[in-house]
Amino acid sequence: MNGTEAVSESKDYPDFGPKDKANQNEMNYIELLADIPEEFIGEDLQHYGPFNKGQIIEIPQQNAKILIGGGVAKQYSNPQIMPTIDDPPIFWAKYYHSLGWNVIPIKGKNYLTGKHKGESIEPEKESKMPLLDTWTEYQTRKITPQEIEQWWARWPMANIGILTGAINDLWVLDVDGPEGVESLQELIRQNGELPNTPSVATGKGYHYYFKANGVEIKNRARFMKGLDTRGNGGYIIAPRSYHLERDRFYLWKRTPEEVPAQIAPEWLLNTINKKYQIDNSPEGKQLKKLIFEGGFIPTGSRNQDLTRLSGLLHGLGFDEDRIENFLLLANETLTGNPLPQEEIRRITKKWEKRKFSNDDLGNAERLISRYGHLFRLCPQVNKFYVWDDKRWLEDDGHIIREMGKDAILGIIQNETRGLTNKDELDAIYDWARRSRSKNKIDAMIGVLDTFRDIKIRPDQLDQDTDLLCCNNGILDLTTFELRPHRQEDYITKIIDVDYDPEATHEVWDNYIKTALPDEGVRIFTQKVAGLCLTGKLHEQKFFNIYGPPDAGKSRFADALTSILGEDIYLATSDFGTFEKTKTAIKGQARSDIMRMKGKRAVIIHEVPEDGQKINERFLTTWTGGDAITTRELFKKEEGFTPTSTIIFVGNHKIKYSGHEDAMIKRTVFIPFENRIPAALQDKELSMKFKTWPEVRKAILNWMVDGLKLYYEDKSVNKGLTLPEKVQELTNIANLENDPVKSFIEKCCYEGPDYNVDARTLYEEFKEYCEAEGIGVLSQTKFGKILTKKGYKKDMGKRPILYLGLGIYQKRGSNNYFEEDVIVET
């Protein structure tokens, strides 16, 4: 078998070499898992067998599928035989290794789960980056079979990269799209055909494999239109990798079994080497390193690096069209996650010949001319924000200084071209030299606040609280659509998670179903988690997750924190921030409250057993969305509007005034009552929530689905519906926090026939509180609460009577009052 069954017919591909026809072979190798003692007739009506268990046989593909499907055979992986398109990627990786080629796993879409042709494919650009952090070491040492086993066990459906360069004695000609085909055809018309050499049909074009034979070929982009090379320090995507954008596999057109890699003709090598010869100036060396040595531009600096490249190209005499072509090329080939093309077109390419003044303002203008689209200054808080391709990153001064230094280097790069006057040149060179000092760079940055176009106000940042910035885009929490990151959103926060509306994971599913076996409570908790995604306070409520130890409460808080990011979209707080005796809204400096500004959720861990009552005024103000005024230490007061859902977590309930309507309607208790045995606890659960990408995507998707469920609930029921167990626990807590109501329910009659004197009623209330371990209210407070509950006094008699209440006669029981005896007055 030579594997050509994986290849479409040759008429589908242009052929630039001598014409020959690939052999077609329908045979498969299988290993018998059981004896087949008798001869049988296959689908092709041929006779086969008998066979013995463990025997490896070559048999037509349709018959092999029947035997494999019947469980009597399995696919045999012989690394020296080219696999078929139906074989898993690891077979192909082993095959290439048997040819002496180093291979590495490549991050194609769904490289873990193996979704490919015929299944749901998102239209976003696939990544062609290696899955290994240190893949470059395999450019100089041979990989082992054990490494291949480990890599594809971890990433079963990873695409396959074959290293190019000396380690494999290979380089590859990449023919990209129709313009690449046209360029190669023109070269062939002028010079003659290519030799028979292994070739591949890719998603958009073709790869031709050549033997390096000691010739150094580097990674070169567009040495002609649509023609690239991959050589030293590079790699190429190999069959049977999957090209998502084109919805097809990479396929061999001419296999290495048919013909080994050939030496490239001299005319092709000369064509490659004579293009884009760049001088050895510092700028030229930097350009060579960036374009031709395969160095990847990291996400987070793509705009800045491509802007710098634009300036370099301009300084080397490239016109605007060529600069744009190079930027598009560098973006596609040198970045792990290319920018959208519209972003590339925003980058400065028209470096107008401008006369900048040789002073600090002139240098500031130079900086803005080069990088003004990538940074903003907020004078009110004296901070710079730099666009990192996804959000406006708060800069500690490091990035703006790097931009400043680069702008100074551009003085010589861009302002000396075309000048012949020695005095002018001397003046520019002298100014450039002096401008490189620390004082001059600081002075340049110091006058930026005089330029209106790069300034921004604090209220322009993170303004839309229905947008959530994820790794792979902006999630609109009103439409639940994911769109590209945009500068004009002025978002400064980002969560380290990709949003995937189909994401699920058994680690999360098992945890949440174990911690919350009651479906009603689980769905309610999911809605609360969803509310933590948005900065709008849809419900004037706060939540207390309550239950025994080892019930999964802290792990749930860990999950929310890991997704929203501590001090990004979420803040954690000490219980003391909310205690009545400690919280102040105005006056004193409250850094703990200022930390909550702009957050979507606040989690308070470990409600103490001996904690004070919560500050009800503060929580009422917060949950009502009213302005909070406070300040950082040594700073002026400022006001802000709360945006956070507040969640208390602990083995103890918060204490509050359960008789106050404002608190009753705001306070909700969520029961985590299923104590998980130690033997069933996953000690690494928090780590998985924080570091496993697929688990993190599943948690985020679960939260988003919770917000959708909340919106459905709100549209039908006008708000958040409390399930039975949540309502029951909340009612119990309200009663525990309303000692007057509890006292009346346990110790009193109610009705028009009953009266009791105020002093007797209060004395019995005090005894009840002492027996229950409840703090005793003053008589005045006790009376006010009774009045608020609708109980009237008869002030015309002495002693004063409460109407409609009677108390049981005390019998010395632990139940305080046993017999239905009315105290007559």
Image (tube, grey):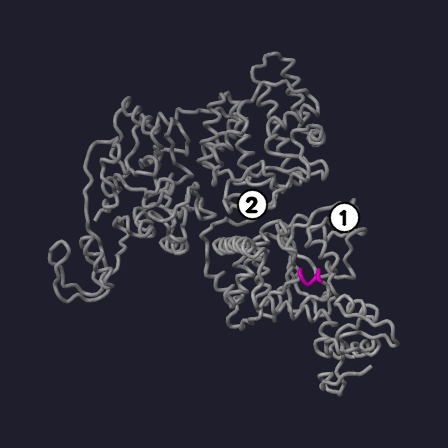
Q: Secondary structure at mark 1?
A: loop
Quick check: 512 above or below 267? below
State the image coordinates of residue 644 (x, y, percent, origin top left): 65, 52
Residue assigned mark 1: 631
Quadrant containing the C terminus in the rendered view: bottom right
Q: Is residue 430 visible?
A: yes
Q: Amino acid at mark 1?
A: Arg
**Start and end of the magenta stretch?**
661-666
Q: Which mark is residue 552?
A: none
The image quarter containing residue 246 is top left
Q: Are marks 1 and 2 in contact (CB under 8 Å)?
A: no
Q: Is 651 above or below relative to 6? A: below
Residue drawn where x is 28% and y is 51% of the image: 86
- For the stretch drawn in magenta, what is the main secondary structure? helix
Q: Along the line of sight, which residue is nearer the eye, 526 or 160?
A: 526
In the displayed structure, does residue 803 sit left or right of residue 32?
A: right
Q: Is residue 690 visible?
A: no
Measured as percent of width and height from the top left, residue 194 is found at: 27, 30
Q: Position of residue 631 (x, y in %)?
A: 76, 48
Task: Quickly name the residue at label 2.
Answer: 469
Image height of 405 relative to 130, above or below: above
Q: Few, some or many C-alpha atoms within 10 Å of disc 2 (few <14, some 14-19, many ≥20)?
A: many
Amino acid residing under circle 2: Cys
Is 81 part of what is drawn in magenta? no
Task: Name the residue: 59% across, 25% down.
Answer: 410
Between 234 and 727, the one nearer to me in the picture = 727
Any magenta on residue 665? yes
